[in-house]
Image: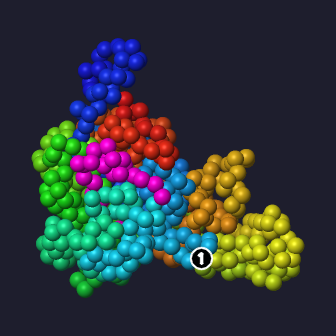
Amino acid sequence: MPNVLRFFVFPAVLVSALISCAVPTDRPRLVLYVSIDQLRGDYFERYQSEFTGGFRRLVTAGVNFTNADLNYAASETGPGHATLGTGAYPATSGIVSNEWIDPRTRREVYCVEDSTAEPVEGYGGGFSARNLLVTGLGDWLKASSPKSKVFSLSPKDRGAILMGGKHPDGAFWYDRKAGRFVTSTYYTRRLPSYVRSLDVSEWIEKNVPPSWEKLMPESVYAKYGPDEMGGEAKWQDDSSFPHPFDQENIKEQIRTSPYVDVLLLDLAREVINAEELGQRDVTDLLCISLSGCDYVGHAFGPNSHEVLDYLLRIDQALGAFLDDVERRVGKDAVLVVMSADHAVQMLPEYAKTIGNERSRRIIFRRDLQPKIAALAAASRKELGLLESPVQQNAFLNYEAAARVGIDSVTLEQSVKRSLLTIDGIEDVYFRRDMTSRENVSSYLDKYQRSYYAPRGKDFYVRFCEDCLITSSPTGSTHGSPYRYDTHVAMVFWGAGLQSKTVTREVHTVDVAPTIAKLLGITYPSTVDGIPLPEVTN
Ligand SMILES: [Zn+2]
């Protein structure tokens, strides 16, 4: 709302009429919708005193939501970006996880795979938004303002594709094999020249030093814990700085560093310049999903010096980027919205050293899979089945049970009783629980918001809190319904917004409808979120 309105008291009807008239003139010309993959909700507060650049500007001058949560269980990259892009829960968008098993064909499906699309100047399969069942912010913007342009960029295919909606003007992602940004024939048959001409080898030569080293003096990092901590992955021989790049492999290795995102911001500059985003008489949308935070966090954990250094460098890079954008587009013409697709768990080895005794690493293949197989075998014997009752750790063999006269409820109860005897398994949910409206616990409702029947499993296992379920002896991950995986950063900045800190719980489904309301555009009933009044009023 323009400031002047705050000084007068109007009857409610008149105020709302004024707001709806006032919105178009206040419209930002460029919306930068930034996702930082794995940006935990506590990073801004923990490292507040270290930031001087972009993060500092956004957090101190923007509307900062300190209690933003996914509010669903599937805390992965695909669902996270689809939720940000569409304002719909995974249950509605259909993007229920990074990969799912098609219950009909029993084939694994990658969330952005598309057999009808071909890669354009990249390797591998064609990727697109075909599996996304709903439209996104970019589609709503273009429907209300056909001249508006929508672009989406990320080092990750699913980051770019799922934030950009169904039909953006372009979506570009980094193909580490090709060593360049690519797209697919779903979007265009030809890469724009400004994407084509970004020579990544040349860029690396100019911008990436031989080793990833700390930006700031050692004392800055030492305040937050040791560099070398238990459970960290190794770079080459050890886990501490400096991290020398292997020149043979550098196009892939920069992904686990801040440099891939510095590169992405340079591509974003090219897109803004070439497409004249924010420089015309309409509102344009540029989605930018930074990925380095996720790769670094997976390898070294959220308390590592590596994640801190990543954030310090992106703070600087983002500050310079926003300066450039403001110079080109104009002050107050840019709305920046930043959030994340999910967060991440602490390394259990480190968590233990700071007093979280129950935190532990459970290696699925080694610690759980043999027990599940043994129990399935026992259950088969007990029920007198000819085949295992559990298939692909996702499906139950209802047919085999029916053949010996066992109904589905009896089969499920038997499987659940067995699974609950395994150390590390807290609860088991079945399809009937996913649609149940009775006795819905606060975890079950998070699984329900992640469940879409045609892409769903017959049963879902909730593991113990603070248990890192992983396939690796080092590093961290996410994917649980627990707060350490679902509490993310969220901030709105620019376009006349006043600085504010909001501590009430809000959800990432709310972001897209909030931006839509700020822009004065309508959105469809597939949106599960609600506009945040702290931003729109
Ligand atoms: Zn992610």
**Picture coordinates of residue 485, whole percent (x, y):** 50, 57
The residue at 71%/80% (across/down) is 373
Residue at (70%, 51%) from the top-left corner? 436
| Image quarter hosting the N terminus | top left
Q: Position of residue 335 (x, y in %)?
A: 26, 43
Neighbor class of circle 1 (other Cα within 10 Å; few <14, some 14-19, many 20+) is few
Position above or below: 229 against 107:
above
Tell me the residue that label 1 is attached to.
Answer: 105
Task: Residue 150: say if magenta.
Answer: yes
Q: Which residues are magenta?
A: 133-158
Residue 537 spot, x, y in % from top left: 37, 29
Question: What secondary structure is marked by label 1?
Answer: loop
Which residue is nearer to you in this view: 325 or 194? 194
- Classify residue 491 by image quadrant: top left
Q: Is residue 242 visible?
A: no
Horizontal arrangement in the rendering, residue 236 relative to residue 406 (left or right): left
Magenta stretch: includes residue 17: no
The answer to whether one can see residue 259 in this image is yes
Protein image colouring: rainbow
**Which residue: 86% across, 80% down?**
384
Q: Position of residue 370 (x, y in %)?
A: 68, 81
Residue closer to the observer: 193 or 351: 193
- Residue 136 in the image: above or below residue 294: above
Badge 1 amino acid: Thr
Along the line of sight, the residue nearer the viewer: 411 or 253: 411
